[in-house]
Amino acid sequence: MSIAVRKNNHIDICLREDVQSRLLNGFEKYRLLHNALPEADFNTYSTETEFLGKKISAPILISSMTGGTEQGEQININLVKAASILNLPFAIGSQRIYISDPGLKIYPYRKLAPNIPFLANVGAVQMNYGFERDDFLRAVDMIEADALILHLNPLQELIQQKGDTNFSGLLKKIESLCSNFPVPVIVKEVGFGISYDTAKKLREAGVAMIDVAGAGGTSWSRVESLIYGESDVRSIAEQFDDWGIPTAECIRSIHEMDASIPLIASGGITNGVEAAKAVHLGASIAGMAAKLLPAAVENSDAVYNVLKSVILQFKIAMFISSGIEKFV
Ligand SMILES: Cc1cc2nc3c(=O)[nH]c(=O)nc-3n(C[C@H](O)[C@H](O)[C@H](O)COP(=O)(O)O)c2cc1C
């Protein structure tokens, strides 16, 4: 199956099937402490922050989803247009397809959004399958990105037929890439989470930020098993339906152990209250993928409307909260 066909299958399956992890994202176990005396004017209260050296309107990131096909490019165009109006950062889906096929032209997304942070994306495992430093530089250059995301997806590759399953020696290769790379390198999972131990190793290797992409949202073992549909693949994959570290637990545990590690919270985040909980637990920014997909296949107005509500929910939640507590 070609990369392009697989990409379109991913979108279709995420839109039509139940691909939710059987774990919750963990934010349900936390309650924001209500502040009845905010001592501020909501009309002048700002959620503005800085991300990758640029001002953004709120700490909300459009997480990596797609690219490389006609449908994927249209989805990204809709996401980028909305992100540009709202001044939010945008992460493109894996650019492997463009690197493997140099003849494939990428849409000039930068023209739609000259000012917002753009994040490039390639699987870290590709370092064991022929991708060199120049390939990662090309991924950054082709969208004029402000950072490079390397994704770690061992469970997805193991369930996928003919997945790339040689993950040996990656930490050293990540370390070597990080030294002297022109933009910050961020490492993320794709929905099973990153533990403190792994985050620490990555940070020591020179990674600028960790996106935990924890469990509680899209489950890539479910998505991959549904693509092939053979019952033996499904019966192996279903044992991993509740695999991973819930997003809130990733953030809390990493931040508690080392508050200096910059964190992106993603994995099952669908609203601004969860984003506010993520920030209270120690994340710099919260990312969303699946929640935006139905709107992104429609048009940019639909994406704008979803994000506008998320920003407002975030703003209200931050305005009237003074901290966070675990209650379960
Ligand atoms: C349709 C779709 C495609 C995705 N493709 C990528 C990808 O190419 N690279 C990547 O790092 N993550 C990819 N992801 C994972 C997301 O960026 C995110 O880490 C994960 O889905 C958890 O977030 P969510 O629960 O908000 O979907 C994809 C997610 C979706 C829903």
Image (cartoon, rainbow, N blue to C red):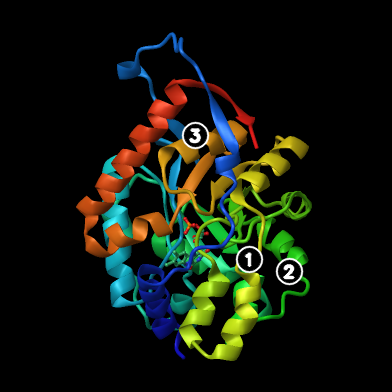
Q: Mark 2 or mark 1: which is in front?
A: 1
Q: Mark 3 or mark 2: which is in front?
A: 3
The C terminus - image quarter: top right
Residue at image mark 2: 170
* Residue drawn at (46%, 26%) of the image: 318
Q: Residues within 10 Å of mark 2 (few under 14, many from 20)?
A: some
- State yes or no: discs 2 and 1 in contact (Cβ < 8 Å): yes
Residue 224: mark: none
Secondary structure under the numbered disc 2 in the rendered image: helix
* Residue drawn at (59%, 64%) of the image: 151
Secondary structure under the numbered disc 3 in the rendered image: helix
* Residue drawn at (49%, 40%) of the image: 274
Disc on the earlier residue, 3 or 2: 2
- The relative height of residue 53 versus residue 300 in the rendered view (above or below) is above
Residue 276: mark: 3
Hey, which quadrant is residue 93 in on the image? bottom left
Residue 152: mark: 1
Q: CA distance from mark 2 to mark 1?
A: 10 Å
Residue 47 place in picture, x, y as percent: 41, 28
Secondary structure under the numbered disc 1 in the rendered image: loop
Tag 2: residue type? Leu
- The relative height of residue 207 versus residue 96 in the rendered view (above or below) is above
- The relative height of residue 248 versus residue 296 in the rendered view (above or below) is above
Tag 1: residue type? Leu
